[in-house]
Image (cartoon, rainbow, N blue to C red):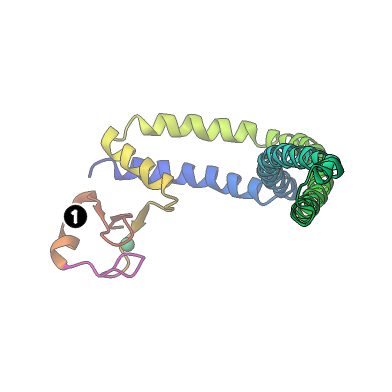
Amino acid sequence: MAALQELLEYQKLDGELRKIELELNATEEKKKLNQAKAVMRNAEMRIAAEDKRALELRAFRDSLTARVDEMSKMIAEYSDVEEIVEGGGDVAFYKKSAQQLMEKLRSLKQELNKMLAEIEQLTAEYKKLMEQGKQMNKQKKEYAEKFKEIQSQYTDRVDELNKKMEETAKNIPADILERYRQKRKEKIFPVLVPLAGDMCVCGMDLPLAQRNRLAGGNVIECENCHRFIYKK
Ligand SMILES: [Zn+2]
């Protein structure tokens, strides 16, 4: 591959940028910012889940209330039981039916109470989450501001590095540059490594035929770690 020197220069600049990025990521401000973002994401997810549950509970409450109403009406009809009995009805039968209805009503009311307890718990949790979200939002804003300040100290250097990289990139064949950038996206760094004895830095043995291809500034790709290997 031609342009080995340019590629090495490009990587050197890239490495400096990467170092700055790592330094920034390691700052307390960035960590606090990321922490706030993560907590907020989690709170948002839980709030969405609770919203869904609240909807379900509301529908359940409506259906229970309708059933309780219906039952109450049926029981009210038994208030006429004395007339029915006087008219020759079976007392034992009406008594039993009324009792069954009362029991059903009792269990419905129990369900309703259980549901109300869940709603109460949900409301309390919801409040807690909203409060937490508010606090984290404050932390996020505060540390975003602080982080921006730290970042601004590097702006000039980062701009300079980017400009130099752009210049250097002009002398690197587009396909090679593309492959380099792809590897960087895959978090490979350094992308270009010198041959280490008969091996790649990852420990992969390179047969002689492959090593011979390194002559004249050529570069080969390691089959194992996908780095570019060159000979010093
Ligand atoms: Zn390798």
**Is residue 135 something that shows in the picture?**
no
Q: Residue at x 65, y 45 (%)?
A: 24
Q: Quadrant of ligand 1?
A: bottom left
Q: Residue at x 54, y 42 (%)?
A: 17
Q: Percent x, y for residue 137?
A: 78, 37
Residue that sits furthest to the left in the current view: 209
The foreground one among 8 and 106 is: 106
Residue numbers of the magenta segment = 197-207
> On the rendered image, what quadrant is the N terminus found in?
top left
Q: Percent x, y for residue 183?
A: 37, 47
Q: Secondary structure at mark 1?
A: helix
**Above or below for 165 versus 111:** above
How many neighbours does mark 1 have within 10 angstroms: few (below 14), some (14-19), or many (20 or more)? few
Ligand 1 is within 8 Å of the C-beta of the residue at disc 1:
no
Q: Residue at x 76, y 47 (%)?
A: 89
Residue for badge 1: 215
Classify residue 188 as left or right of residue 25: left
Classify residue 5 as left or right of residue 152: left
Q: Percent x, y for residue 40?
A: 71, 42
**Is residue 67 something that shows in the picture?**
yes
Q: Residue at x 50, y 32 (%)?
A: 162
